[in-house]
Image (cartoon, rainbow, N blue to C red):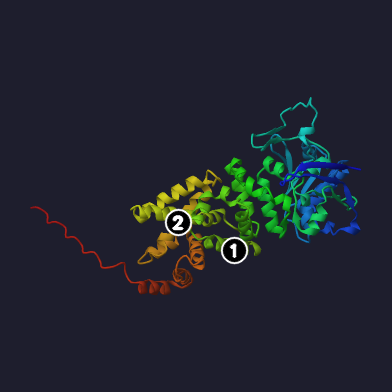
C-alpha cells in the first residue's frame, strides 16, 4: 500500500507533516458515472486498458463530475509512453519537446493523454538526462521532465482536488492526497509546502484563484498564506504564458469573482500594472466590473467572448489616466489619444503579451469612442460600416452602464441600427448640421 509522509515548514515557522496514502473508493461510495464521460474519452481509456496499459481519467474531469457538474475537457493519465499511445491511435499527434504528450482527435473534441510523471529530484544519478530538473535563483522550476509511477504523478500535481483518478475497469476513484475530503469541505489545498510549490511555478497562485472563483471554494489558510508576499514572482513568468492565463481567468464565466480575488491577493498588479496604478490613483474600476459581468452573462448563455474586448476593458482606466495627463500637458485631444494608446499597450506587453490580432481591434475600439458622438451628415453611416463598430458600440454601452458618461448616446445608436432608411434620415436631420456652412471661395479670374 502506497503511503508517503511529506514534511515542510509552514508560513508561521512551524514544522508540518502531512501523510498521503492511496485510497480506492468503490462505485457505491461515489457519484462518478460512465454516462458523465464523453464517448471519445471512454474509447481512449478502453483501448489503452485493452492494450495492457494502466489508464485513468484524471484531474478536473473527475473533480467536476464528483461536484455534480459537466466537464468540458477530459484528460487521461497512463503508464504508456507518448510513442506507445501515438502508435495505438492513428487520429493522434505528439505535442511538446522535452516532455511529450499526446492529443487524440475526435472531430472538435481533443483528449489529452499524458504519461505518469515523477519527481526528477529522486531520479537515478546516472540518468541519461541529468538536467531534467532545474530551478532558477527564485526557485522557479525550469525543467521537470521525468516519467514515474501513478503515485508520483499524483503528488506532483498542484491541488489535492486535482489528484483524483477514475478507473473505468472497476469504477473506483483513486485518491492519493485526501482530495475527496477537500472537495467535501469546498476548499483548495496545495499538495506539499505552499511556498515551495508557488516558487516552483508562480502561476499556481493564479490557478488557486481561478479554481476558487469557478468552484466557489475557499483557499485553505496555509495555501493562501504566502500568496500576497509571493505575488511579485509572477513578473518572472514569460508574458506570452501570462496572456494565456489571463484568458483562462476571465473566460471561465466567473470573471468578476476572479477579479475580486486577484485584487485581494495582490495578483492583479503583476498582470495589469498600469491599470492597478491608475485605480490606486483614483480612476474608477466600475467599467471593468460591468464588462466582466457582461462577459459572465455571455458565457452563461453559451456565447463567445473576444479577448480584445476583455483587454480593452481591463486597460481602460490606464488609458484614461494617460490620455488625461497628455491633454493636461497641452496635447490636442486626438494626438493625445493615439500617443496614450501606444504607451499603455507598450507597457502592458511587458507584463502580458497581446498578439497583434487582438491589440489592433482593441485600439480600434478605443479610437471609435471618439467617433461615436460625431454623427452628423454621413459620419454615422461611415462609423457604422467600420468592421469594429459593433464591439465599439457594446463598449459604449458598458461606459454608460458603468456611469462613466451620461446615458443617451448608446440609445441613439441602438435606434439608428434598428430603424429603416427613412427613420435614419429623420434622426440625422434632428441632430442638425455641423454648424454654419463654409462660404465657397471664388476662383480667381483667368488672366487674358
Residue to which mark 1 is pinned: 293
State if disc 2 and disc 1 touch (CB < 8 Å): no
Taking the image as shown, residue 330 lies to the left or right of residue 366, namely left
Which class describes the residues within 10 Å of circle 1: few (<14), some (14-19), or many (20+)?
A: some
Residue 182, horizontal then vertical, whole percent = 79, 55
Query: Can the viewer see residue 398 in this picture?
Result: yes
Per the rendering, the mark at residue 320 is 2
Residue 444, horizontal then vertical, whole percent = 14, 56
Viewer-closest of 398 and 38: 398
- What is the C-alpha distance between the residues marked 1 and 2? 21 Å
Taking the image as shown, residue 27 lies to the left or right of residue 43, namely right
Viewer-closest of 405 and 306: 405
Query: Can the viewer see residue 108 in this picture?
Result: no
Picture residue at 65% right of the left edge, 57% below the top: 252
Residue 271, horizontal then vertical, whole percent = 57, 49
Most distant residue in the front direction: 13
SS class of the residue under badge 1? helix
Which class describes the residues within 10 Å of circle 2: few (<14), some (14-19), or many (20+)?
A: some
Picture residue at 53% right of the left edge, 63% below the top: 286
122 over 196 or under it: above or below: above
Viewer-closest of 372 and 145: 145
Amino acid at each position: 500500500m502506497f503511503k508517503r509522509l511529506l514534511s515542510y515548514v509552514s508560513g508561521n515557522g512551524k514544522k508540518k507533516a502531512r501523510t498521503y496514502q492511496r485510497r480506492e473508493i468503490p462505485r457505491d461510495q461515489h457519484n462518478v458515472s460512465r454516462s458523465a464521460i464523453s464517448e471519445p474519452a471512454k474509447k481512449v481509456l478502453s483501448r489503452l486498458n485493452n492494450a495492457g496499459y494502466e489508464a485513468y481519467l484524471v484531474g478536473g474531469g473527475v473533480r467536476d463530475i464528483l461536484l455534480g457538474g459537466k466537464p468540458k475537457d477530459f484528460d487521461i493519465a497512463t503508464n504508456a509512453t507518448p510513442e506507445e499511445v501515438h502508435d495505438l491511435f492513428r487520429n493522434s499527434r505528439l505535442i511538446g519537446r522535452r516532455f511529450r504528450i499526446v492529443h487524440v482527435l475526435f472531430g472538435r473534441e481533443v483528449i489529452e493523454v499524458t504519461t505518469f510523471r515523477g519527481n526528477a529530484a529522486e531520479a537515478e544519478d546516472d540518468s541519461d538526462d541529468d538536467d531534467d530538473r532545474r530551478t532558477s535563483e527564485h526557485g522557479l522550476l525550469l525543467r521537470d521532465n521525468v516519467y514515474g509511477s501513478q503515485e508520483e504523478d499524483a503528488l506532483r500535481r498542484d491541488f489535492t482536488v486535482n489528484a483524483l483518478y477514475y478507473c473505468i475497469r472497476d469504477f473506483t476513484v483513486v485518491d492519493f492526497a485526501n482530495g475527496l475530503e477537500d472537495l467535501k469541505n469546498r476548499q483548495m489545498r496545495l499538495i506539499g509546502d505552499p511556498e515551495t510549490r508557488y516558487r516552483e511555478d508562480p502561476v499556481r497562485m493564479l490557478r488557486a484563484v481561478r479554481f476558487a472563483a469557478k468552484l466557489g471554494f475557499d483557499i485553505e489558510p496555509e495555501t493562501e498564506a504566502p500568496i500576497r508576499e509571493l505575488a511579485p514572482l509572477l513578473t518572472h513568468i514569460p508574458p506570452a504564458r501570462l496572456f494565456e492565463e489571463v484568458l483562462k481567468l476571465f473566460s471561465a464565466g466567473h470573471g468578476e469573482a476572479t477579479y475580486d480575488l486577484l485584487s485581494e491577493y495582490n495578483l492583479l498588479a503583476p498582470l495589469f500594472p498600469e491599470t492597478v496604478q491608475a485605480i490606486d490613483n483614483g480612476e474608477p474600476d466600475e467599467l471593468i466590473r460591468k464588462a466582466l459581468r457582461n462577459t459572465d452573462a455571455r458565457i452563461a448563455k453559451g456565447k463567445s467572448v473576444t479577448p480584445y474586448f476583455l483587454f480593452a476593458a481591463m486597460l481602460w482606466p490606464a488609458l484614461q489616466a494617460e490620455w488625461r495627463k497628455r491633454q493636461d500637458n497641452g496635447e490636442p485631444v486626438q494626438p493625445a489619444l493615439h500617443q496614450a494608446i501606444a504607451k499603455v499597450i507598450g507597457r502592458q506587453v511587458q507584463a502580458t503579451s497581446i498578439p497583434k490580432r487582438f491589440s489592433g481591434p482593441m485600439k480600434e475600439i478605443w479610437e471609435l469612442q471618439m467617433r461615436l458622438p460625431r454623427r452628423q451628415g454621413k459620419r454615422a453611416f461611415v462609423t457604422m460600416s467600420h468592421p469594429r463598430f459593433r464591439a465599439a458600440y457594446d463598449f459604449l454601452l458598458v461606459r454608460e452602464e458603468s456611469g462613466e458618461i451620461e446615458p443617451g448616446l448608446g440609445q441613439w445608436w441602438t435606434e439608428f441600427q434598428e430603424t429603416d432608411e427613412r427613420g435614419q434620415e429623420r434622426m440625422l436631420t434632428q441632430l442638425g448640421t455641423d454648424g454654419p456652412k463654409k462660404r465657397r471661395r471664388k476662383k480667381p479670374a483667368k488672366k487674358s
